[in-house]
Image: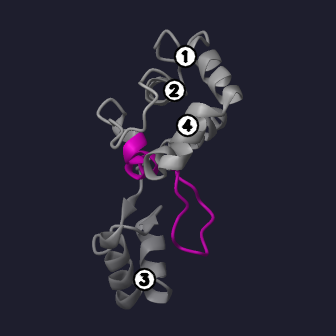
Amino acid sequence: MSFSSSALLFSFIVLIHGVLKWQNKFEFLKAQALAFKYQLSKLLTLKGLSTGQKISGTNAGVILNAVEWLWMALYSTPTNIREKIDTSSLSAAILNPLPELCERVLRHCSNKQCKKRESTVGKWSVCSLCGITCYCSDGCSGLDKQKEHTPEMCNFLALRHSDC
């Protein structure tokens, strides 16, 4: 996944959530933002994105879903104010992006003395109690648990993790 496609997708996620949360943003984009309408139309016809083909290393499918949804929600519906915007056609990665984003992160070892980073997503094990801290080896896990990752810290992280 390229940085530019991730940044574009993130921008669309923020925009869509803004449109869903604030009716005035929806109405502004629908009525006033001609430049935005033009840019959406250009994205809809962009080679590779518009065909729906899988472009290696990008978020093309989810970006296309976001662009198509915005176009339909803003410009292909009657001009009256809608009470509820239909989100049934939106990708789960747009409506709830955190699991998708978290699953593709290369993590650093939680042992502060270690500078290693995962080479493959999800390769390292995580703490069985909190499910958050991760370690490159049993040695790093043991050292960190002696100094930093105390039972109190682990309980705190588990509590925060369950709240998210």
Q: Are marks 2 and 1 in contact (CB under 8 Å)?
A: yes
Q: CA distance from mark 2 to mark 1?
A: 10 Å
Marks 3 and 2 sit apart, C-alpha to C-alpha, by 46 Å
Residue sitting at x 59%, y 40%: 28
Q: Secondary structure at mark 3?
A: helix
Cα distance, mark 4 to mark 1?
A: 12 Å
Are there few (<14), some (14-19), or many (20+) residues within 10 Å of tag 3? Answer: some
Q: From the image, tell me which residue sits under label 1.
A: 49
Q: Nearer the viewer, residue 104 or 14?
A: 14
Q: Nearer the viewer, mark 4 or mark 3?
A: 4
Indicate the amino acid at tag 1.
Answer: Leu
Closer to the N terminus: mark 4 or mark 1?
A: 4
Magenta part of the chain: 94-118
- Residue 48: which quarter of the image? top right
The span from disc 4 to disc 2 (Cα, nearest Å) is: 10 Å
Give above or below for 120 relative to 158.
above
Residue found 36% across the figure and 64% down from its top: 126
Name the foreground residue: 10 vs 81.
Answer: 81
**CB atoms at circles 4 and 3 under 8 Å apart?**
no
In the rendered structure, find residue 9 and report the number of the disc placed on it. Answer: 4
Q: In front: mark 2 or mark 1?
A: 2
> Dot 4: within a 10 Å radius of its alpha carbon, few (fewer than 14), some, or many (20 or more) residues?
many
Closer to the N terminus: mark 1 or mark 3?
1
